Amino acid sequence: MNVIYGINSVTETLKAGGRAFEWIGLAKERHDLRLQRIIEESRRNNITVRFLSRVELDRLAGSGAHQGVVAVTSAKQYADLDDLLANKRGQYSFVVVLDGVEDPQNLGALLRVADGAGVDGVVLTERRSAPLSPVAVKASAGAAEHLRIARVVNLVRALEELKQQNLWIIGLDERGTSDYDRFDFTGDCVLVLGREGAGLHDLVRKSCDHLLRIPMAGGVSSLNVSAAGAVVLYEAFRQRRAAAQSGAGASVKAGSASKPLKQKGLGS
């Protein structure tokens, strides 16, 4: 049985239409507007609604963080790399790759940021990576349901396949040689984010065309992966949005030259 829980998670899953719903359980003690909207949307989609006690919902969700809403659904369908490249949101491809992010809260936060920043899809590894669990879906506020997500066995091979499709592979690493805000993200590119604490695996780092860093002004040397991802993804989004508005996107690939932008330090 596959479940998702939380008001935003269930609401966005209903909107996305990517899963089949078996039924939705709601807390019988709650009678607020947000749950009423879920009831109305469920009825429009002929989804059974059951009113349960909080104890029953806790048991079903395996957590008390369900906000009075738990849905029994089909599993999310994963995409493949070709799907990600074939369904661009803009003129140029923009893909995020997660190299062994194991914390479901970080995974969910990154999926939420990736959706907001307009990426075409996210690539996860099948091993040594957080699964797309109910915790991760809730942490994404349901954004996971609007993203194409691929899972791969061999990440280095997947990066090579993306290179063959003329995408630049850009790794974020504290050992990077260029500041992230001096890089041109306006063409076809892949942003690779590494593990909590350890960063990119050696073979993954060697597969990157460019290694970028976030300059730090405080006492610690790096940001949490979800915070670092948000910083760089929204810089990329800013550049790509400005280029689209001006009609001046990159002609072939991103990263062919660094932009002469003034470096800005980031504190912790």
Image (cartoon, helix red, strand yellow):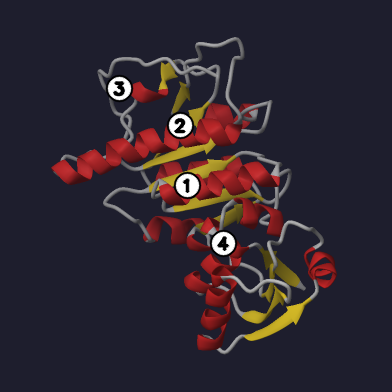
Task: Give the spatial CA distance, label 4 vs label 3.
Answer: 39 Å
Residue 116 in the image, given as x and y percentages of width and height: 42, 49
State the residue position of label 3: 258
Comparing labels 4 and 3, the label whose residue is closer to the camera: 4
Looking at this view, is 212 or 38 the one in front?
38
Give me the disc on residue 8: 4
State the residue position of label 1: 114
At 73% across and 73% down in the image, what residue appears?
29
* Mark 2 residue type: Val
* Mark 4 residue type: Asn
| Horizontal side, residue 256 vs residue 148: left or right | left
Residue 146 in the image, given as x and y percentages of width and height: 48, 62
Residue 161 in the image, given as x and y percentages of width and height: 48, 47
- Identify the residue at the far bottom of this view: 46
Sequence order check: which comes first, mark 2 or mark 3? 2
Task: Give the spatial CA distance, label 1 vs label 4.
Answer: 17 Å
